[in-house]
Amino acid sequence: MFHRGFRGRVRVVVACGGSPDSGEPSGETTEVPGVAEAYTIPGEEVFPEGVAYDEETGDFFVGSTTDGTIFRGNVDGGPAEMEVFLEPGGDDRETAVGLEVEGGRLYVAGGDTGRAWVYDAESGELVNSYETPEAEMTFINDVAVAPNGDAYFTDSMRPTLFRISEGSAEMEPWLDLDGTPVEYTEGFNLNGIAATEDGRYLITVQSETGQLFRVDTESGEVAEVDLGGDTLANGDGILLEGQTLYVVRNAQGVIVPVELDEEFASGEVGGGFTDPSFSYPTTIASYEGRLLVVNAQFDERGGNPELHFTVSDIQIPQ
């Protein structure tokens, strides 16, 4: 069991010790001193996934993939244990995957339900719920909100990007990915997604292949981000801060920085970093030079997860 105040060392490591031939990132291994803290999540079968931070209040939110509970914590001296913000099953919310907070609203991706929800991030009042067209397979995985209020969702099972336009009551299939550089395969495809500061581009990672893609929100053009032969397999949640993209590689238990060019068309993959408190990390959010890292323990589904589930709070290595 972890708790706030857990002390460790942030380690910068080679992501899987890759080589140029394998496409895996490579780099020197170094250690960066740091203090890791952790928030605990109540419940024995939470298996959390998404995290979203509200810079206006210091609140952050984490969702349960097993029953849709939304938990809330606070980085400004809040309790070590997160509290239940939205009860499980409310508004037919059977699961909660990717999360985002923007403009006082909490956006929730609904995984294999094919749904999404938007709540008031302070009161928890439902703003609206959305459904996507029926499909043989669907997994609404992650969400990014652009500065104009449009929210974009990835579907890891069907090649479509969905959008909720600001003020719209519908969740539209905004972009058909068939015929683009994004080729869907077996397993999880597009996963984490982020919007650039000006909203011109979306950046998204394909978990199965480890590729990054740039999507033009004006033209709908999709291009692969040139990583010089590197790949980021098992890429899950991503975080874009300026030109630096942080990619969580869940199975490897590392977070990998990618320095992108001005047009977000190419990038240089750096050495990954990890922490002893990580346990199959999935998604991240940032505040004041630190990262909130969700420890999903998905590798222990059906097994014996270490209780309690946690959110690590670490300093971003410089």
Image: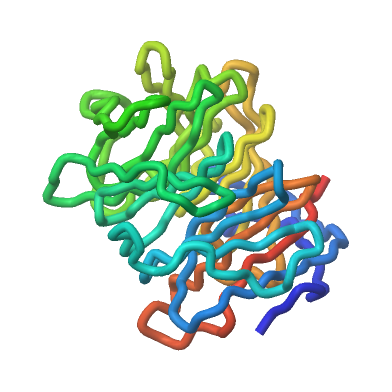
Residue 39 in percent (x, y) is at 68, 70
Q: Quadrant of residue 42?
A: bottom right
**In front of the other: 205 or 109:** 109
* Camera sees residue 21: no
Residue 276 vs 163, above or below: the answer is: below
Estimate the x, y position of residue 213 in percent, counting from the top left.
44, 30
Give the residue furthest to the top: 219
Left or right, 96 with respect to 60, comes to left
19 and 207: which is toward the camera:
207
Quadrant housing the N terminus: bottom right
Left or right: 244 as drawn, with respect to 123: right
Left or right, 292 with respect to 280, comes to right
For the residue pair 219 and 3, the one nearer the viewer reads as: 3
Q: How is the image coloured?
A: rainbow
The front one of 289 and 27 is 289
Is 80 located above or below residue 136 in the figure? below
Residue at the image point whose x is 32% and y is 54% from the top: 111
* Residue 174 at x, y percent in the picture: 29, 26
Residue 240 seen in the current view: yes
Taking the spot 63% from the left edge, 59% from the top edge, the residue there is: 293
**Which image quadrant for residue 197?**
top right
The number of numbered discs placed on residues in the rendered structure image is 0
Expressed as whole percent of the image width and height from the top left, the position of residue 294 reads: 58, 62
Q: Residue at x 32, y 45 (%)?
A: 129
The residue lying furthest to the bottom in this view is 304
Q: Is residue 90 left or right of residue 176?
A: right
Figure quadrant of the C terminus: top right
Residue name at image x 57 percent, y 84 percent: 307
Above-or-below relation of 45 to 197? below
Q: Is residue 50 above or below residue 155?
A: below
